[in-house]
Amino acid sequence: EDPRPRGVPTSRKPVGAFRFRAQAVLLATGGIGANLDLVRRFWPERVGPPPGRLLSGVPDHVDGQGLLLAQQAGARLVNLDRMWHYPEGVENHTPLWTHHGIRILPGPSPLWVDATGRRLPPPLFPGFDALETLRYLRGTGFDWSWFVLDLRTLKREFALSGSEQNPDLTGRSWPLVLKNRLLGPAAPVKAFLTRGKDFLLAEDLSELMRRMDALAPGVLDPSRLEREVKARDRELLNPFAKDAQVLAVHAFRRYLGDRLFRVAKPAPLLKGRGPLVAVRLWTLTRKTLGGIQTDLKGRALTPSGAPLEGLFAAGEAAGFGGGAFHGYKALEGTFLGGCLFTGLRAAQGVLEGLE
Ligand SMILES: Cc1cc2nc3c(=O)[nH]c(=O)nc-3n(C[C@H](O)[C@H](O)[C@H](O)COP(=O)(O)OP(=O)(O)OC[C@H]3O[C@@H](n4cnc5c(N)ncnc54)[C@H](O)[C@@H]3O)c2cc1C
């Protein structure tokens, strides 16, 4: 019952300013990724202990309040320890929300080492398996890891996740998309190179390692990192290399699109192809795969399994439909589809209930 005159846009006034009687409520309030306390509380044990420092990869409104509301109303929350976080987060130099982190969408070439300089084991290469890499890194006892690469590789291979980081795509500018891919890096990547706290540039490896050590004193073992760099450089020069990452890079480059736009020509780091870069990476929260348990009509269920009258849920709030549609280790990019689909089913469920 909206007492206001007709024609007043509802968004102009907070909901509390007028009374209404809902026949159905559909909660689509998102997950818990910005509520770092909740993330830590439900942190999946199988991944190891939660990091001391977490970056938030989602806006502040993804605070889990909708889930708690639903629970208070009698709904059952399930699979809260199913979350999808990324190990390739960097602190945003211009934060739009609290603890704002940006995920690097890396190409396959950077050398990925833990905080001490030890290379990650195969197949934990950049962009390969986020959850498994997260599990491995949680076992190292440190909250961060490093990408080590040269500037030319960074220019070709680094992209950043988030609409504000991709003005070429969001602005639908094909000339800019082509320019960024061919000449790179895009302006947002350049901004991180100059302003990102965790981006270090140096002319040679010794200087780079000095700078890495200055950022986290006493943790990096320089001789270890030097050995790792030399060992991989040897493999890059070997036409019969068996190094799994080197093989993968060559395989990517057999596809013309990747060779032109995405995967840099492999080159040893110590061969002097230009400045070297180290990027310190943190865990970045992102997706919530557990939440309000629903049936296939989007009806919230009580702990007994019976529908809770009048309450529906969709999207991340419903754990993508009760525990992740595409599985716990779903393919990248398949999350939004589950949100939209559960939204459709829940809306149909609401309408059925009103008939
Ligand atoms: C940077 C980034 C990149 C991503 N990339 C991909 C990708 O490539 N592919 C993919 O599949 N997924 C991706 N995702 C994930 C995907 O965007 C989310 O899973 C999806 O948007 C969740 O949709 P949702 O409607 O459930 O929740 P949200 O999009 O979080 O929407 C929740 C809405 O509820 C509102 N709300 C919250 N609390 C309240 C309240 N108490 N009262 C009123 N309103 C409230 C919020 O303002 C918001 O509008 C990405 C996410 C981010 C942040």
Image: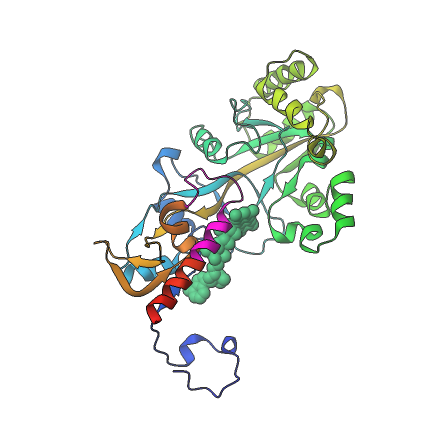
Nearer to the camera, 109 or 54:
109
Check the image and tell me how it is coloured: rainbow
- Name the residue rendered at 32%, 53% in the picture: 293
Tell me the quadrant of the picture where the N terminus can be found: bottom left
Any magenta on residue 236?
no
Q: Position of residue 129 (x, y in %)?
A: 50, 32
Residue range in magenta is 325-343
Picture quadrant of residue 155: top right
Task: Count up the numbered dots.
Answer: 0
Nearer to the camera, 39 or 143:
39
Q: Is residue 324 above or below residue 204?
A: below
Any magenta on residue 338?
yes
Q: Is residue 218 above or below residue 313?
A: above
Q: Residue furthest left?
A: 304
Q: Residue furthest bottom?
A: 5
Picture quadrant of residue 71: bottom left
Residue 61 in view here: no
Q: Is residue 272 above or below residue 319?
A: above
- Name the residue rendered at 37%, 62% in the picture: 349
Tell me the quadrant of the picture where the C terminus can be found: bottom left
- Name the residue rendered at 28%, 54% in the picture: 76
306 with respect to 112 (left or right): left
Q: Position of residue 177 (x, y in %)?
A: 74, 47
Nearer to the camera, 160 or 281:
160
Q: Position of residue 289 (x, y in %)?
A: 41, 46
Q: Position of residue 90 (x, y in %)?
A: 58, 42
- Name the residue rendered at 74%, 29% in the picture: 275
